[in-house]
Amino acid sequence: MDIKEEDTSEESKKNHIEYYKSLTKTISDIKEEMQDEEDPVIKNHLEKRIEAMEKDKMRIKEMFPDIINE
């Protein structure tokens, strides 16, 4: 993964933390939606969305390892 210097600025960190928190909320919301969903195609789509968001969260954790503490 290429990390640019501007990606690790304090402003960027603040924005990434906010985004990280929103991803966590969105993933939680999608998991709730999946409980009520019966269509396997839709469930699969929701699972793929969660996977993509989890990858994004992992990328942010790699950029800012102390993000959990904030």
Image (spheres, rainbow, N blue to C red):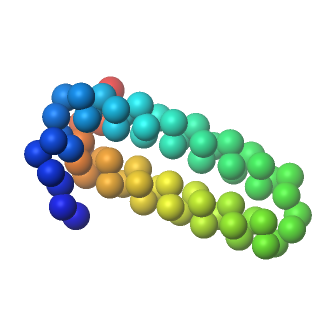
Residue plotted at (80% across, 53% down) = 35
Residue 65 x %, y %: 23, 43
x and y percent of residue 30 in the render? 68, 49
65 sits to left or right of 52 = left
Residue 14 visible in image: yes
Residue at 32 percent across and 54 percent down: it is 59
The N terminus, quarter of image:
bottom left
Residue 47 spot, x, y in % from top left: 64, 64
Task: Identify whether 39 is placed above or below 50.
Answer: below
Q: Residue furthest left?
A: 5
Q: Depth check: give the residue in front, 38 or 9.
A: 9
Residue pictured at 85% horizontal, 58% vertical: 37
Viewer can see residue 69? no
Q: Above or below — where is 39 with respect to 63?
A: below
Where residue 23 sits: x, y (%)? 51, 43
Name the residue located 32 percent from the left edge and 48 percent from the top edge: 60
Quadrant in which the C terminus is drawn: top left
Q: Quadrant of residue 66?
A: top left
Q: Answer left or right for 28 relative to 13.
A: right
